[in-house]
Structures are given as C-alpha cells and as structure tokens.
Amino acid sequence: MANLLDRAVESFKRVGEGLKTVFMHSFREPTTQEYPEKIQDLAPHFRGRLALAVNPDTGDHLCISCRQCERVCPDKCIEITAHKSPETNKLELIDFKIDHGLCMFCGLCTEVCPTTCIINTNDFEMADYSRESLIYDIKRLTLTQDESTYYFDKKELPRPKPKAAAKPAAAAGAAGAAAKSAAAGGDAAAKAAAAKAAAAKAAAAKAAAAKAAAAKTDDGETKAEPKAESKSEEKAAEPKADAEAAKKDVVEAKTEDITAEPKADAEAAKKDVVEAKTEDKAAEAPEKDAKKDVKEAKADEKDPE
C-alpha cells in the first residue's frame, strides 16, 4: 500500500513539472527560424553527409585503401576500388563510392579510419530526384583543401602526421658500406692500373691493324672507281639514245599526220563537187520532161486544126 502511494505521488510530481513547462512557454513570444535564409549553427560532431578529406597542409589525399570503413559499414553502402602499384608495392586508390540512399549515418566508418580521411560534414540538404544521383563517387566526395581545414579545426581532429624520413639505421648502414668499399678500393687500385695499361696496349694494336685494313680498302676503291665510272657512263648513254629515237618517231608521226590531212580534205572536196553535179542533173531532168510535155501538148493542139 505504501509503495502505491509513493508511486502516485511521484507521478503527480512529473505531471506538475510538465504543466509548469507548458505554462512558462505559454506566456513567451514565439520565435520563428527563417530557414533557409538563416541556418542554425550545428554541433561540431553533427553527422551529416559523408566526405573524403585531404591533408590540410599539403592537399594530398588521405585515403590509403585499407578498406576498414567498407568492412565495418552495416549497410554495405561503401565500395572501394584500388590496385597494387608495381613501383611502390602499395595500394593506390582508383575510385571510392558511397550510396547515401542506404547510409544510416551511424558514424562507424569515421571512427575506424586510421588517417581521418572519411568524416561527417554539416551538409544535410541531399534531396534529389533519383536514387542513382545519391551515389557519390570520389570526385563528389573529395573536399577541397580549404574545406578540409575548416572541418579539421571545427571537429578538432588530429592533423595527419608528415611522411617519415629515412631511418638513421639505414643511413648508418650505408655509411659502413661506403667505408668498406673505400678500404677495398685501395687494394684494387694497383690491379686497375695494370688492367688499364694492358687495355691501352691492346687498343694501340687494334688501331694499327685498323689503319692497315683501311689503306687496303682505299687502294681497292681507287682501282674500282674507273670501271664503275665507265659502266655508269654507258648506262647513262643508253637512255639518251632511246630518248632520241623516240623523239624522231614522234616527229615522223606528226609530219605524216600533217601531210595526210590536206589529201583527205581534197578528196572530200572532190566528192562534194561530184555529189553536187549529180544533184543538179537530177534537178534538171524533171524540167526537161516538163518542157517535152508542153511541146507535145502544143503539137496536139495544132493537129486538129
């Protein structure tokens, strides 16, 4: 019984606190937020649209293609495409896609990223007309250097560490190797000098042999030059003779054509004259026949008289 009374009293207290809050706001003036002209300041760790940041100091891309964000994503909305470089033997990023239509903005991908590459921005206005347009590729995801600096400062994210320089142990090893090579070089100096002297003698012998061979070839060339010149002159003369003969043939053909043309014209003129005479005779024959007919008619008229 006492427990029931305590619970009832506690419930009335809660109701009273709620009514008190209602009455307090009932006498206050309403406040209107003029959105989108005035946007409310969002919290630094607001989980908005996902994006890929670059190094605020150098502008280099921070993604190392480790795929940890792709593995931890509960909605499987992240897809990374990368390949191993044959030069550096490291993964190189080719494409990075995020389907914001599937993303539930849990922030797990931002927590597991070792280089602080993938972050939540303050962008929440992502309405679009198709589901395909909600799939962002690496170009739409990557922020500029100024935007990355803004979010690193606002979210108080740790700056990327600069690339490590060469290790001192490696430098010491290189120095030791140089010292060893210098010590070994003293012993090899004498051997190198002897080898150089032998090489010089061999080179001199080769040069003498080459000179002798060159002299022989020069003599052979001088002997062969007159024969070659005579042959070339004969070969050059043959085309000239052929060209002259061809020119003569062309001239003779032209002269024959020229002489043949007047003959043909004279024969054609004679034919035309003969044809004209025959036509005149053929035309005179009807006239003669008509005259005969007239004479006969007159003679017939005279006979009855």
Image (cartoon, rainbow, N blue to C red):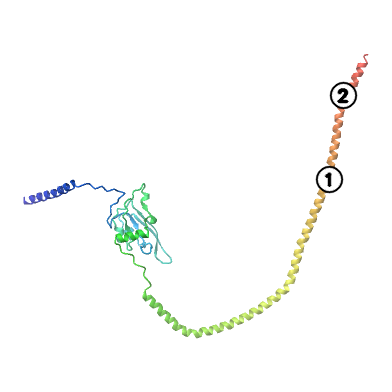
Residue ID at (37%, 50%): 133
Measuring from the top left, give residue 100's x and y in whole percent.
Answer: 33, 52
Q: Which residue is mark 1?
A: 262
Q: What crowding class fits label 2: few (fewer than 14 Cα within 10 Å), some (14-19), or many (20 or more)?
A: few
> Is 246 placed left or right of 79 in the picture?
right
- The answer to which of 75 and 258 lies nearer the viewer is 258
Instruction: Indicate the quadrant where residue 70 lies.
Output: bottom left
Amino acid at the residue labelled 2: Ala
In the image, is 265 to the left or to the right of 32? right
Q: Tell me if mark 1 has few (under 14), some (14-19) or many (20+) residues whose alpha carbon lies within 10 angstroms of its own.
A: few
In the rendered view, does 301 fall on the left or right side of 7?
Answer: right
Residue at left offset 60%, top offset 82%: 204
| Sequence-first disc among 2 and 1 | 1
At numbered mark 1, what does the secondary structure look like: helix, strand or loop? helix
Place residue 48 in its image quadrant.
Answer: bottom left
Please report the residue visible at 40 percent of the width from the left and 79 percent of the height from the top. 175
Asked whether 195 or 94 is in front, the reply is 94
Give the percent coordinates (x, y) of residue 246: 78, 56
Which quadrant is the C terminus positioned in? top right
Residue 272 location in percent, x, y?
A: 84, 37
Residue 78: quarter of image: bottom left
Which residue is outermost to the left? 1
Callout 2: helix, strand or loop?
helix
Placement of 101 over or under 89, stated as above or below: above
Residue carrying label 2 = 290
* Kind of residue at badge 1: Pro
